[in-house]
Image (cartoon, rainbow, N blue to C red):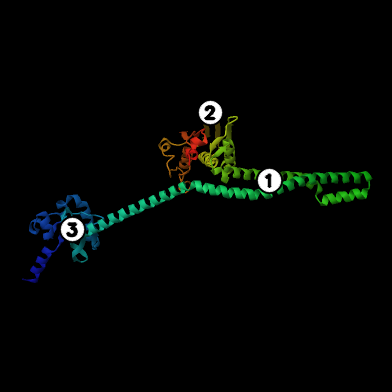
Amino acid sequence: MTTQSVLENLTAKLPLGVCVLNDQMDVLYWNDFFADRLNISSDDVKGQNLLTLFPNEAKYLKKKINSVFVLNNASFSYWEHRPHVFLFSSSRPITGEETLMYQNIEFLPLDVTDNKVKTVCMIVQDVTELASYYQGQKELSEQLSQEHKALQELNRKLEEAQNQLLQADKMAAIGQLAAGVAHEINNPIGFINSNLQSLEDYAVKLLKLVNFYEKVVHKTQNKTFIALQKDMQERMKYQFIREDMPELVAESIDGINRVSEIVKSLKAFSHVDSSEWQYADIVEGIESTLKIANNELKYHVEIHREYQQQLPKLFCQPMQLNQVFLNLIVNGAQAIVDKGHIYITVSATDNDYQVAIKDTGCGISKSAMHKIFEPFYTTKPVGQGTGLGLSLSYSIVQKHKGNLVVTSEPNVGTTFTVILPILTPEQLLPEASAPA
């Protein structure tokens, strides 16, 4: 057997597709890889146009082969970019399942004369096994990634749920701290306020005394004394001090009174005793909450109050209800983009309390209305809300055997109504009255 015949036999039997083309895309030769799959022998296919044989891929094949003729450089088609150029079948290595063949194709300049390509050799490699492996790895990686994300989301929800469950304990701790701080601040505020009151009295008396001396000097009609007095008063800026000193003392007293009110409101809002069930004044709780929320309200929200006269005290957990009022008031303020109003109405019947908090903010869409009390749901940007405020408020109201009702109209405003039944300690806490 000659070397030529050996090479021809080897080329024919290679587990690769080998196809030789001229510059007209006519097939000059292909091996058994092509012949077996298309049932066209190398002798029968000779002279037929490749683009006619594979019309669906003609545009792609023409572009790749022409680049070799024009540039005299090899070109490559990778299975991830073009998986099935030729619709050949292949068996999966493990299952034996028939599937389309994934192919890598290389286009090589074969016969080159005077730097001009005369023929191109197209080599097709079956990479179905490799492609199946990579696809399996990719699917597994994506599955693991999804499971990782699901675990992260579950961990986040568990952490948020734990935070919600610990909220009552945290509020009690905050109340204990606030009560201690308020007590410590009250002592210095008390003697500062007392001293300022005394200083105000002393300043009035000193000014009267100076006025008396002025009159005495002028009565002497002694020009030297009068000149000395005038010179001293000018050097000491006496006229300015006489006018400014009463105002300074009055402003200081007003500032101390404001600090006292803030401390009083903080103590009333989160005092440790308030975590217990007790009879409380709801309006007093709302007012202390408004002082706490003042930073969110000032400059762009005007508060309107409508309180029914002679409201009865309610058996409740005042600190927890204050937390509800704070959430609703702050939410209302944050819903107001520029300037707006919040209307707080408190009324009571023989059976229940009703606290309505209405804002003139952006409102809530219909699609969001059924989700607003769900834990972790929020319409605020990322990082600006946990989605627990309304959920926590709802659970607190339910613990008081009440209801939290919402009505809203987009671009008009939202009204939250807290309905609290007037119940006895035995009705709210039946375990407390049960026999030991």
Which mark is first along the chain, 1 or 2? 1
Mark 3 — residue?
A: 94
* Secondary structure under the numbered disc 2 in the rendered image: loop
* Secondary structure under the numbered disc 3 in the rendered image: loop
Can residue 244 be seen by looking at this rendering?
no
In this rendering, position of residue 136 left or right of residue 41:
right
**Which tag is nearer the camera, tag 1 or tag 3?**
1
Residue 133 position, x and y percent, is: 24, 58
The span from disc 1 to disc 3 (Cα, nearest Å) is: 85 Å
Can residue 144 be seen by looking at this rendering?
yes
Q: For mark 3, does the 10 Å Cα neighbourhood hold few (<14), some (14 to 19), or many (20 or more) residues? A: few
**Image height of 142 relative to 284, above or below:** below
Mark 1 — residue?
A: 256
Quadrant of the image occupied by residue 378: top left
Mark 2 — residue?
A: 350
Look at label 1 and name its amino acid: Ile
**Image height of 144 relative to 73, above or below:** above
